[in-house]
Amino acid sequence: MPWSLQDRPKGEKPSDCEVASSTDKTVTLPAGADPPLVTGNLGFHDITQLVSYHTEKRPPSAWYMAIAVSSTLLCVLLIMIAYLVWNGIGVWGNNNPVGWGWPIVNFVFWVGIGHAGTLISAILFLFRQKWRTAINRSAEAMTLFAVICALLFPTIHVGRIWVIYWTLPIPNQMEMWPQFKSPLLWDVFAVSVYFIVSLIFWYVGLIPDLATLRDRARTALRRRVTGFFALGWTGANRHWRNYEKTYLLLAALATPLVLSVHSVVSFDFAISIIPGWHTTIFPPYFVAGAIFSGFAMVMTLLILARKIYGIQNIITMDHLEKMAIIILLTGTMVGFAYITEFFIAWYSQVEYEQYAFLNRATGPYAWAYWTMMSCNLLFPQFFWIKRLRRSIPFLFITSIVVNIGMWFERFVITVISLHRDFLPSSWDYFNPTIVDVLTLIGSFGLFLTLFLVFLRYLPMVAIAEVKMVLPESDPHYHHKHESEEH
Amino acid sequence: MISLPIVDGTPSGSGMKAWRSPPHREQDPQFVETVAEEFLPGASDAPSGSNRRQFMQLLGASMAMAGLAACRRPVERIMPFVDRPEETIPGIPLQYATAMNFRGTARPLVVKSYDGRPVKIEGNNQHPNASGASGVFEQASLLQLYDPDRSKSTLRTGTTANWEDFLSLCQRLQTGVRRVAVLAAPDNSPTRARLRAQLESQFPNTLWVDYRSEGDDSELLGTQMAYGQALQVAYDFENADVIVSLDADFLGPHAKNGSLDTHSFARGRKLNGAQDRMSRLYVAESTYSVTGIMADHRRRMRSDAVSQMASQLATALGVYDGATPDAFASSIASDLQGANGNCIVVAGESQPAEVHALCALMNDALGAVGTTVTLLDTGMPVQAAQSQALPALVEEMRAGRVDVLLMLGVNPVYDAPQSLDFQGALERVSDTIHVGLHVDETARASTWHIPAAHFLESWGDGRSQDGTLTAIQPLIAPLYEDARSEIEILAVLGSGQFQRGYDLVRDSWRPILSGEDFETDWRRVLHDGYLEGTSYPSATPAASSFGGQVQGPGTGLELVLRLDPTVLDGSFANNAWCQELPDPVTKIVWDNVAVVSPKTAEDLELSCEYSKGRYYSDVVTLAANDQVIELPVWILPGHADDTVSVTLGYGRDISTTRPERDTPFWDKDDETDIYARGTLATGVGTNVSLLRDLAAHPVIPGVELTKTGRKWTIVTTQDHGILDTEARPIIRSATLDEYREDPAFALQGEVPTPGSDVKTDFQDYPELWKDRHPSQSPSFRDSDYWQNQWGMVIDLNSCTGCNACIVACQAENNIQVVGKKEVGNGRELHWLRVDRYFVTEGGEELDADPMIAVQPMPCQHCENAPCESVCPVAATVHSPDGTNQMIYNRCIGTRYCANNCPYKVRRYNYYNWSKTIPETVQMAQNPNVSIRFRGVMEKCSFCIQRIRGAQKRAGLEKRALQRDEVASACQQACPAEAITFGDLNDEQSQVSQAMRNARSYKLLAELNIKPRVSYLARVSNPNNALESAGQT
């Protein structure tokens, strides 16, 4: 059993339902059926119990250690931002040819990570990929927190943060509007719309589970809070009908956003005229990269969470393997894009373009380029081997390697292209400062703190949705398989 | 406040009595008082009685104060003008003609002053001996005036004294002084000559030594040697066909007549039509100089081998019996002989007098004297060379035979040869008086220090290079109470009485202006800045002869000392603009280095590694004449082997009383403020003058160079770059023959763009932005500004890379200085940079003899500006008159525009640099240009404030803007006339004509950004005879 009665807080009697759920039930599967998505013969109540329980009991000591570290890092971030705003952008390494340094690298990195959640929830939902149910909740939460981190960077990277609201179309006495031709403005809209839609989508998915928490609540306060957010959910048929329609519509709305937001982010580069940026391949290449890094981040987090919280039966090895396959696919796609860029540079016969790519591979930042190439293109190729796809340590290492590689991809695109462009006289080198480094590390603090708070207070798996993919929740399950046999 | 009596308003007499209220009627005392004071005291009634006199006194006093305030507004008391001083309108600048003494010659200037505050210096274009251009040092001298570290009070043995103390000293000295000595920077001022005579008559034994930091004036000694009299040589480079420079950097910013010579040299190479003539320049030199950049044939050789070259040349020309000429020398000789006297052979300052004498001989023999070479008789007596006079003076001092030593504008403790032990000698003199702008090395070693008044604060005079008498008038009262001009101090010492500089100068000019009405003539001189027809007579000396012997090249490593092209001899070392000005060739800022060739570096295992945006150079010790100094090395391709070049003017130690800025650890103001820790010059670079021998020769043979094993970080504004001009046609050039064949050679192979002159298959493709381009919108067309479309043309064939434009731009546009560390971080703010590229034939490897090409790079004001379309808040937009404008108030600082600029000309305020500028430096800021806050982008604006100013003026005068009325700051300063700016809508404007020049091309035109700046391709004029012989 993944959870046990010993997990119960001391001095508390086991409830009736807990005792009842601990009894084994066996659903016999017909031969030739798909392997079950939830293993361990869990029933409806087991799943409720397994997921909800973690929001109710004292968190494991690992959680306390993690939040201590992450909130320290969050403080570092806040100190770095205060230092930055007091002194100016000069505390970073940005200079004249390299106007955008780490903050923009981090922005694109976090936006990319923020892709997996909505992709898993929306696109895989529309494609009826039922295995998504085990991971969509935490992936969506991760998306939101990653986008919060992402939104932070363009905000603090402007020189005069106190007038950043000028990028928003707010009517004013100057009759001055933002400049709608600027991709940065498109970013403002794309990322904020993506954030809002993802938030609504996530919240709508949470409603039935919040109602579950409300019903299980033992204190008045908890009942009040969860009840408020559960919006009076009773599980009535009409509720379910409206809920499922809303969810479907939101999925349809979020799907184009998954593709658009990173396409728009890629326009920041593609719209410009700098060699290495001015590339039409960027939108699909960025989207593939985003999914790639997003899945890697989901994998990193879930490998730890499923272990610590003992939900290996819900987030199974099969789930991880499926994610590994997506990482292999998208990693190969970005690798293909890297090579295509080189081909086009050669094919264009434009000196500036050719030099930009030659400089990536052989210039002063060649180490960054080759880090990117090996992490993103070569490393995921090991996933062709099934044994490695199903090896937890290997998956964990790869997921981290991929995210390192993807951070370097953004570094390669942003910094290497800028540091040597058209006129050799203005070429220079970019050196990050300690503030750059601590701000990046601090942003992980923000991300992890938010994620840990999520793990503590909200069901990390979509209880209702997982129940829907249990064999016994399908009224036609036996009938379907029987008819197939004929 | 004078209280004026209130006339009692109670009507007298009887009649109907009106009242307002019962208390009024009852004559309540309180009420009566209130009624009486209905108006403020004195407001309702005229003053009467004796108080009228007081009132008139007040009126008179305010008039007098208004007059005073015209000189300089009081700093702390606010005292508005009661009457507007004559001729001043607040906000409308006034221009005054004045002059600056630069290395002994007056450079005529026109200075712009806002409300009594000089803010910009230009050349005087009316002056017969000036081009209207101005060099680096004229521009930068403005910041000298406002230097926060200028000495502020009289010092007696290091403690604060006052002017009266010094006055009483001078009165005491009038009797009983055995010997007075004067050590003064060269100056050809008539007033100074008069006061010198006065001093010499008062103290018959006076010893006067002219002191130049760089040592002997070998040109003067050379003419003395050749003609038997000291003559000044003036060259007409414009009309010369063949010019040979023997280690002469006559175009350099530090050259004595740099601006004038650059002007005439560039005129001799202007190519407007295919058949225009162009001069040919041969350069033999040791280091790569600005003149070397312009050479058609450049040969690098040790400085002491140049004399050998001179000897060969003179032999080939048959005026000397010296070394057998090699192929190079004979080709030059035959080229010179074919020039029909329109040729110049000029020797450099680091060459000995013998080489200058040989040049005189050659110019004479070639028939150049009288055509392109003019000998001017300055009327100065033959003087002992400094190399003899200075040691003699020091000997006298040490022997205790000098009682008073006056040092005017010199700093011998810093730059006299160490072997002289000047400081030791100084201690033997009972009264040593130092006059200078700073409390410097000599000031601290002297018993008296008097703060010198800057030339913008004092009256004076001088003579321009051709001798034209030129007036120096102040624009501002001395910023510090004790500051006195050199002539005032000379007069005080000579007479014991203080006389104002104004009177001193006028007294000198009374015999000069011998016309009937002195005052009218004098006002005329002040208005024009000069007196017509007072140039030196040209000398027609007897035929030159030279019996001396030219020394052959030495062995071992030689060291050559030169004036620095950015800080001169150190007098500009505390000037932030000069310190941050990149060296024209090495592009190094805030340092001096020992420059060696790649081969010498290899031989001596010296390295200068580039890593992550900075250079890490080996620190070496240089030992000569029992002195050792340490310097970082710099490896310069094109530098001669076995020779080390260093520049003077670094390693200064200037005192200041300014407190240090100290901020808490979380506030970086003290790190980013260049003025935060003491004086700017202190601790920057190394003093190389210590190495010189007693005679202070600029070339030191047999110097020992040893590696210390330590490294020093060197910061440049530009990496070492080689340019493959095939792959990146940034700088386009051809030979004169190629140019004549195809004047439009620059457009060969140009990638076609829509609308360009190059016909292509794509010609008829629709242009996305053509119809909807903002410039076509009604709001643009309806604007008055639409009438003018501004553009710029930069002639790469004229530009020498002298940097004058950079400093002019900095002065005009309030560009802040960021310091060595931040330049190293790539955050310098110069709006205009001068790109320097090494151009080699192969393109790949840096060989030993690369050409250097320079290219000034302002904002190109693209019509399809890539910066504009990416700004999210529309902070950079196009004006109806075609300039790309930066709206500082709107900028939020995303830096996207800078990223998307293909020329990388946008500059970002990474810190709040304008916050920490000292109060006096704030006075140097141009009031017409916004000071930029941190977090905003800035860039070249085509001097939009000048354009709008001219338009406003034209509007007030109800006339159209005249042709070429507006000049940008860089254009106005450029001595080579390389920059043309103006209205492209006017077919006849200079810029339109230049734009039609066949050599015109636009940089990165293939990006279809339509830059408004055109470059005129460079043309070289090689000697085909040499080319075919395989010589370069």
Image (tube, helix red, strand yellow):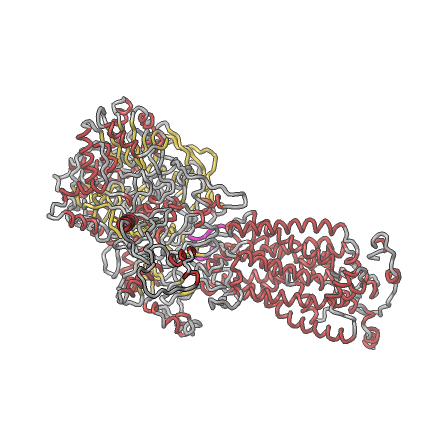
Quarter residue B104 falls in: top left
| Magenta range | A419-429
| Residue B602 in view here | no
| Residue B980 in view here | yes
Front in this rendered view, residue B388 or B752: B388
- Looking at the image, residue B779 sits to the left or right of residue B549; the answer is right
In the image, residue B337 lies in the stretch drawn in magenta: no
In the rendered image, residue B19, in percent from the top left (x then y), is placed at 39, 64
In the rendered image, residue A36, in percent from the top left (x then y), is placed at 80, 66
In the rendered image, residue A17, in percent from the top left (x then y), is placed at 87, 62
In the image, residue A420 lies in the stretch drawn in magenta: yes
In the rendered image, residue B916, in percent from the top left (x then y), is placed at 44, 47
| Relative to B687, residue B60 above or below | below
- Looking at the image, residue A246 sits to the left or right of residue A77; the answer is right
Residue lying at 48% horizontally and 44% vertically, measured from the top left = B671
Front in this rendered view, residue B474 or B797: B474
| Relative to A201, residue B92 above or below | above
**Residue that protrudes farthest toward the top in the picture:** B399
**Residue that protrudes farthest toward the front in the picture:** B14
Identify the main secondary structure in magenta: loop
- The number of callouts visible is 0
- Looking at the image, residue B970 sits to the left or right of residue A96; the answer is left
Residue lying at 74% horizontally and 50% vertically, measured from the top left = A62
